[in-house]
Each structure stands twice: as structure tokens, then as C-alpha cells.
Amino acid sequence: LNGEIYGGGRQSQDFLRAICQVLDEKPAACNDLPEEPKFELIVLTDERCEDCKAMVTRITPQLKQLFPGMSVKEMDYSNTQGKNLYESNNVQYLPAFLFPEQVETASNYAQISRYLRPAGDYQSLAVGSDFDPTKEICENGKDDTGNGLIDCEDPDCEQSLVCREENPQHLAVFVMSECPYGTRALDAMNEVLANFKDEITFEVNYIASYNNETDSFNALHGQSEVDENIRQLCAAKYYPENNKYMEYIWCRNEDITSTDWESCAQMADLDEQKIAECSEGEEGVKLLKDNIKLADSLGIGASPTWLVNNKYTFSGITAEVVKTNFCKYNEDVAGCENTLTAKSDIPAGGC
């Protein structure tokens, strides 16, 4: 609209209002539009957070288009007023987009209402913020928490990727077992493992959550995915030699939603009874509980996400992408000179 991307409402009145705002000479229809409530949005951010700046730059203009009567006041955690606002309204992560109660009378309120969460005197818009200003920033050379410990010395940074100990020639992937992109990523490992042979150590980790109150797991693709995650972990526990468990996974990926996992266990020459006893009992529950802690601690939620040498992440679903990123941090490994399959039957993506 007028050379800029439109991100406002999708009702006819929203389009009309947006057009009227850019016209110098406004037609009569513009005067008939109901006046939108005027209120102030507070954007609480932190100048130390580069990702926060990008989010604020991207989201604020979209909100202005949704709420033409809204003004914006940006505040920073680094000053006393911003810190007091953070503490008095139980804000945890920045940036925070804090709406007053007047937003409820705006015509486009329904478009964001389900994403609003109580935050003291305000309603905070859930936008996936993850910067905790009370924690140590792990690579700025400063003591952010005042405990005398800088960057990786601070316990806050224990699980930070930048502070993890490098483990050469190691590759891990984080997946949801029923995610179509995750299955393609695991399928690509057939060629990757054959290419690098003994020059690579590989492991599979899973993305899910555990609810202590209900004593149950939650997975994006439901209980069947939870069950398959556990079966694959059991296979990995009992058949790690030469990544034999991957033969079971590759077989399952041909029809991952099928309940007939036993035929794949037979094909891979795994003991069905051993896998069943493990996956259907407390052993399997503990395996998944322990396994998903790593993805959670690293903030990994997209399937697939790869981790090279215990430190460096990337995404992709083809053997060539995996090889290229592995060799980026392991340049002299035999097999890096080879060209692997660079095409997939589906576009690159993730769950």
C-alpha cells in the first residue's frame, strides 16, 4: 500500500481505513469511519539484545496498521524506569509488547486477543520472545549479573551453545519422529554415514515436552509420535554398534504413521520383544524424559535441527547440506571431498 507492505486487518473497513490514512484528499467515506480508540503500547526491550531489535522493528509497524489509534512508547530494561516496569509486571522475556486494557475496544482486538497474556497492569503479546535480561549474556565480555563471573564462567551459560565444549567429528540431529522434514533428514543420513564411515559419530535426539502434573509427554504429532520416539530410543540403546538402529528408523520412515513397527524391527534384525519391553515400560519413559532435556536446554524446537561438534547448529534435509555443514567444522575428514545428493522430494522446511 503506497509502496509499503500492508500488515493490517483483512476486513473491508481495515482496507478503507489504511487507504484513507495515505490520501491527502480524503473522500467522504473516510469521514464515515468510526474513530478508533487511542491508547499507548509500551514496547519493553533491551539494548544489549540484537534479536530483540529485529523483532521490534518487524512487529511494531504491523501492530500500528492493526491499531491506527495506537501510539508507541519504547522503554529499555537498562534504565531504572524500564527495569521497574519489568519487575512490577512480572515480565520474563524481552521484547515485551504491553497493551493497556483500552485495546479491548479496538475493532481489530479479536485478531490478537488469543495471543495476549496477563502481565500485571497490562496484556503482553506472545511473540516468541526468549531474551531474559536477568541472565548472563554469554559472549559480551561483561559480568551482566554482578556475581563476578563473566560469560562462560557464569552458571547461566552452562547450556549456551557458545560455551559448550567442542567435540570434533560429532553430529547430532533433533527431530520429531513423525515430522516429514525430520524423516527426510534421517533418511539423508543413510548416504552421509556411508560417506564418512568411521570418521563420524552420530546420534538422534527428540523434540517433545513432559508435563509433570499429568505425568505425560506432549508431542506435536500426538501420542503416536511419543510412542515412536520411545521405540527409536530403545533401538538406539540396544543396537548402537555401527548405527544399526538407523536401519529400523529408515524402515519406519517409509510409512512412519503405520502402527506396524514390528515388521521394521524384523527387517533390521532387532529383538522385537526387547524393543517392546523397553518402549512400553518405565525404561522407555525414562529414556525419552532424559533425551528431550537437551533440546529443551538448548532452546531447540524445530525439526530437524542439526548440531555439529556439540556447538554449531544448522538446518537442512539433504545429504549434501549435512555433509557441507559437517565439513565446515571438520575440514580434514575423509569424505568431505565427495559430492552427495543435493535434491529432495520435498522443499526444505521444518516442523
Image (cartoon, helix red, strand yellow):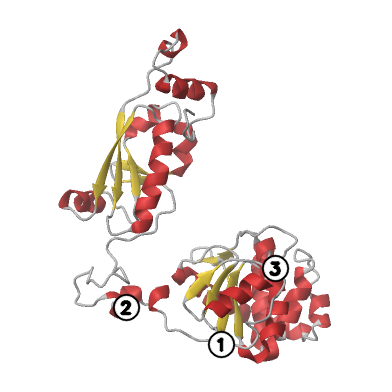
**Numbered badge on residue 185:** none
347 up-or-down from 183: above or below? above
Q: Which of marks 3 and 1 precedes in the sequence?
A: 1
The residue type indicated by label 3 comes to Ala
Q: Quadrant of residue 67?
A: top left
Q: Position of residue 147 (x, y in %)?
A: 20, 74
Q: Secondary structure at mark 2?
A: helix
Q: Secondary structure at mark 3?
A: loop
Q: Secondary structure at mark 1?
A: loop
Query: How many residues crowd mark 3 within 10 Å: few (<14), some (14–19), many (20+)?
Result: few
Identity of the residue drawn at 35% across and 57% down: 50
Q: Position of residue 91 (x, y in %)?
A: 31, 52
Between the C-alphas of marks 1 and 3, the distance is 21 Å
**Numbered badge on residue 342:** 3
Identity of the residue drawn at 36% across and 54% down: 52
For label 1, the residue is: 332
The residue type indicated by label 2 comes to Cys
- Label 2 near label 1: C-beta < 8 Å? no
Marks 1 and 2: which is nearer the front?
1
Q: Position of residue 175 (x, y in %)?
A: 61, 68
Q: Quadrant of residue 237?
A: bottom right
For label 2, the residue is: 152
